[in-house]
Amino acid sequence: MKEPFLQAKPILKKLIEAGFEAYFVGGSVRDHLLKRKLGDVDIATSALPEDVERLFPKTIPVGIKHGTVVVIHDGVCYEVTTFRIDGEYKDFRRPSEVKFVTSLEQDLSRRDFTINAIAMDISGKIIDPFNGIKDLQKKVIQTVGIPDDRFLEDPLRMMRAIRFVSQLDFVLSEETKKSIQKHAHYLKNIAVERILIEFEKLLEGKAVDKALSLILELQIYKYLPGFADKKSELLTFAKNCLKLPLTLEEQWALLITILKIENIESFFREWKSSNEKIRTCKQIISALNKLQKGAALTPYFIYTTGKNILLSSIKLLCILENRSFDELADIVEIIHKKLPIYSRKELALTGIDVMDWYQKKGGPWLAQIINDVEKAVVEGIVQNTKADIKEWLLKCNPPSENNY
Ligand code: ATP
Ligand code: MG
C-alpha cells in the first residue's frame, strides 16, 4: 500500500474498531491502480457524520448535510463521507438532499464513472462492483449505469468525463460519447464555478489536445463562456497548447491570445476566475504584446516585466511563432542574473537626497527623476552608488536648468 494510504489507515482502523465499515474510495484508489501520483485520499464509511465527529478529536463539519466530515489526522485533512445515494438534483445544483445508506455498493453506484467507483479496504483488497479495473485497463471512461440518466442527473459529469480524458489520456466509451453529444446543452444550467474547476483540470491534463477536440466535436464549447463563436480558434489552440509545458496561467494567456479575446477582464469575469489569476494572465499577455511588436530583451524590459512573467510570455511567443524557447530563456536568465538591482528599494538614493541636491520640495518632478535614475542604473549607465548617481544626475540635469 502506498504512503498516503498508510498514513490514513488509522482512520479506517478506528472506524472499523467502533463497529463501522470504512474504505478508501474515489480518485486516490483509481490513481493508485494506475500508478499515478495520488491526490487527496477520500474515505467512505457506514458511520454517520455525528459518529465520525464523536470518534475523532479534530474534525471540520464541511458538509454534514451531504454526509462529509473532514478528519484531521497527523496534520492531513481527509474527507470522510457517509455511504449515501444522491437525492434529486434540483436546478442542476448539487443534490438538495442525500440519503444515507448502509452498503458500500450503493455508495459506489452513485459515483460518476466506473473508474471512480472502485473501493479499497484496510488490507488493500479492491472492491470493484462496476468493473472499473477493466475500464482502467482498456483506458475507457464510461458512466456507472445508463449515461443518459447519469448526465441528466448532473450535467457537470459531461465536463468531468472530458477532463478525465485529458488527465489520464483515456477515451470515452461510444455510449458515453453519444450521450454527451445529446445532452451537452444541459451544461447551460450548471454553475460556472463548477465548470471552471473541471475545465482547469482539463487544461492541465496531458491529453488536453484530445479533450479539446471532444469539446468541439460534442458541441460542449457552445456552452462554455466566451467560446461559442470561436470554433476554429479553439482548434488552433488545441494544436498548439502542448508544444511546451505550460502552467495554468500560461494556458489561459495562450487561449486568450489565440481566441483573440478583446475584453480580457469581462471574459474572465464570465468564467468567474480569481483576481490573482486575471492579474497574472494580463501581465503575461501585455509582455507578449510588447514582444510581438518587437521589444528587445533589454535589462530594463526584463527588470520592469519581472523574470517569471517575461519567461511565460516568451514561451507563448515561441509557441505562436514556432521558435525555440531555450535559447531565449537562457538570454533572459543571463541578463537577469547580471541586473545591478532587482527593485527600486535597492537604489542607493532616496527622495530626500534628490530634494536636497536640487533644493526643491517634492512633487511629480521627483518621481520622474527617480524613474530616470532607476532606468539608468538598471541599464548600467550609472553605478548604483550615491556619489555616482549624484554626479550623473547633476551633470545631466544641473539644478540651474532643471528640466524636471
Ligand atoms: P481528482 O484526482 O482530480 O481529485 P477525483 O476522482 O478524486 O479526481 P473529485 O472531484 O475529487 O474527483 O471527486 C471524488 C470522487 O467523488 C470521484 O472519484 C467520484 O467517485 C465522486 N464524484 C465526484 N463528483 C461527482 C459527480 N458529479 N457525480 C458523481 N460522482 C462524483
Ligand atoms: Mg479528489
Image (cartoon, helix red, strand yellow):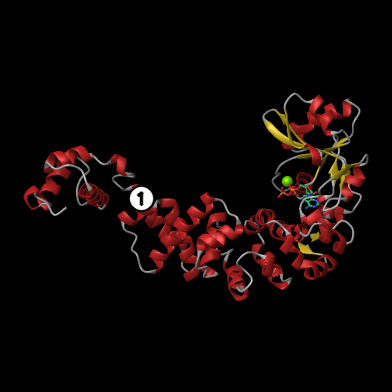
Q: Residue at x 57, y 55 (%)?
A: 248
Q: Secondary structure at mark 1?
A: helix
View extreme (bottom): residue: 232
Q: How far across and down, in percent of the image, does residue 96 sit?
A: 81, 48
Looking at the image, residue 35 sits to the left or right of residue 398; the answer is right
Looking at the image, residue 251 sits to the left or right of residue 168; the answer is left
**Total number of numbered discs in the rendering:** 1
Looking at the image, residue 314 sits to the left or right of residue 227; the answer is left
View extreme (left): residue: 400
Q: Residue at x 20, y 43 (%)?
A: 362
Q: Quadrant of the N terminus?
A: top right
Q: Looking at this view, is 138 or 350 the one in front? A: 350
Q: Looking at this view, is 212 or 149 the one in front? A: 149
Q: Residues within 10 Å of mark 1 (few under 14, many from 20)?
A: some
Can residue 322 be spotted in the picture? no
Q: Is mark 1 within 8 Å of ligand 1?
A: no
Q: Relative to residue 42, is residue 276 depicted above or below? A: below
Can residue 310 be spotted in the picture? yes
Q: How far across and down, in percent of the image, does residue 58 sit?
A: 72, 26
The residue tagged 1 is 336
Q: Residue at x 33, y 63 (%)?
A: 296
Q: Looking at this view, is 333 or 82 the one in front? A: 82
The disc labelled 1 sits on which kind of residue?
His
Q: How far across and down, in percent of the image, does residue 346 sit?
A: 29, 40
Q: Relative to residue 234, is residue 251 depicted above or below? A: above
Q: Relative to residue 47, is residue 383 depicted above or below? A: below
Rendering quarter of residue 103: top right
Q: How far across and down, in percent of the image, does residue 291 sit?
A: 39, 65
Q: Residue at x 54, y 55 (%)?
A: 249
